[in-house]
Image (tube, helix red, strand yellow):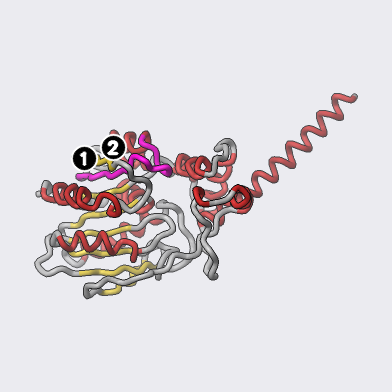
């Protein structure tokens, strides 16, 4: 009889724990995929948080205000409003006697103005550029992000716009989430760019969620899986199937892949799996003493050399 009572108590305790864990994960997932429109302070990176702040973040999630364009191109540019799954805004910078156009896609929690520096480097190489705000960022519609899943359609919309203008030499450039969106777009919509340049794409959505827990020195099991489950449910897709290393198997166009060896958000294993699965001509460049950051900060000369060599090889 006592064992029966103890069994019921244990089940009740486990049920309460289950509810608490799912509630925390549900709240985390929503905050991770939705930017508040109101003015609020962004949660600091895990390395800069105190122990108390880390506990608070683990319980209540991160705060990421909607990213806003913080500067504008120095060149003459055209502002485009394109209708995709959401209305997205882009800047088109046309270069005289252009060799083609590079479309630039930003990472998570960023926006198109953070791509201006890289756009300038492509312009120096003789290309026109198109800088895109994904949904939820900059001046694009909404406050939602799906970490590259639905953004894939916005990559297609941007690509199709240029194709319709008669542009034939289109390169796609993406960093982190932007790289993932490019890969998923090629897999889903079979677009055929001249080549793609992708920086630090994660191997799977589950692995990138786990990486966030590891940076907080928190156990990944079972919360990472629960968070991913609720994040997918909230945003209308199955998060466990969002796997760029699988998308890579459908990519046959020339690909230049960048990675920083000290990246704590994406592992070398994920990059190697993506690189192995790519089907077309491919190059992998690893930058030492570099994390999940803007590669131009520490590697500008080498980055430009790698880009120039990659493009010159495409005839």
Check contact, mark 1 vs mark 2: CB within 8 A: yes
* Side of 87 relative to 251 (left or right): right
Q: Is residue 299 magenta?
A: no
Q: Which residue is denoted by mark 1 in the rendering? A: 282
The span picked out in magenta is 254-268
Q: Position of residue 303 (x, y in %)?
A: 22, 50
Would you identify the image quadrant in which residue 251 lies? top left
Pick whichever, 251 or 29, lies toward us: 29
Q: Which residue is denoted by mark 2 in the rendering? A: 275
Quadrant of the snapshot with the N terminus:
top right
Q: CA distance from mark 1 to mark 2?
A: 8 Å
Pick whichever, 253 or 268, lies toward us: 268
Q: Position of residue 163 (x, y in %)?
A: 21, 62
What residue is drawn where x is 62% and y is 53%? 60
* Side of 21 relative to 153 (left or right): right
Question: Earlier along the polypeptide chain: callout 1 or callout 2?
Answer: 2
Pick whichever, 41 or 159, lies toward us: 41
Asked if residue 116 can be seen in this view, the reply is yes
Pick whichever, 99 or 199, lies toward us: 199
What residue is drawn where x is 12% and y is 64%? 98
Identify the mark at residue 77; answer none if there is no mark.
none
Q: Position of residue 72 (x, y in %)?
A: 31, 72
Asked if residue 27 can be seen in this view, the reply is no
């Amino acid at each position: 009889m006592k064992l029966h009572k103890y069994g019921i108590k244990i089940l009740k305790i486990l049920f309460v724990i289950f509810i608490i864990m799912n509630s925390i994960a549900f709240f985390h997932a929503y905050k991770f995929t939705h930017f508040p429109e109101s003015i609020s302070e962004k949660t600091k990176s895990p390395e800069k948080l105190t122990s108390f702040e880390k506990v608070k973040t683990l319980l209540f999630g991160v705060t990421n205000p909607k990213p806003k364009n913080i500067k504008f191109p120095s060149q003459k540019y055209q502002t485009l409003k394109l209708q995709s799954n959401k209305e997205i805004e882009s800047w088109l910078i046309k270069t005289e006697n252009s060799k083609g156009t590079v479309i630039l896609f930003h990472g998570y929690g960023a926006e198109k103005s953070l791509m201006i520096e890289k756009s300038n480097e492509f312009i120096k190489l003789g290309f026109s550029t198109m800088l895109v705000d994904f949904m939820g960022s900059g001046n694009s519609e909404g406050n939602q992000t799906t970490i590259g899943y639905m953004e894939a359609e916005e990559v297609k919309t941007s690509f199709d716009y240029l194709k319709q203008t008669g542009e034939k030499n289109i390169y796609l450039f993406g960093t982190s989430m932007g790289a993932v969106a490019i890969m998923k777009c090629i897999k889903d919509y079979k677009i055929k760019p001249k080549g793609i340049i992708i920086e630090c794409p994660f191997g799977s959505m589950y692995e990138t969620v786990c990486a966030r827990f590891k940076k907080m020195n928190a156990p990944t099991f079972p919360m990472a899986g629960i968070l991913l489950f609720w994040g997918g449910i909230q945003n209308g897709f199955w998060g466990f199937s969002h796997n760029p290393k699988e998308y890579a198997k459908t990519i046959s166009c020339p690909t230049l892949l960048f990675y920083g060896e000290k990246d704590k958000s994406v592992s070398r294993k994920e990059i190697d799996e993506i690189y192995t699965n790519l089907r077309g001509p491919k190059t992998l460049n690893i930058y030492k003493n570099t994390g999940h950051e803007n590669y131009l900060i520490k590697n500008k000369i080498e980055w430009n050399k790698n880009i120039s060599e990659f493009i010159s090889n495409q005839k």
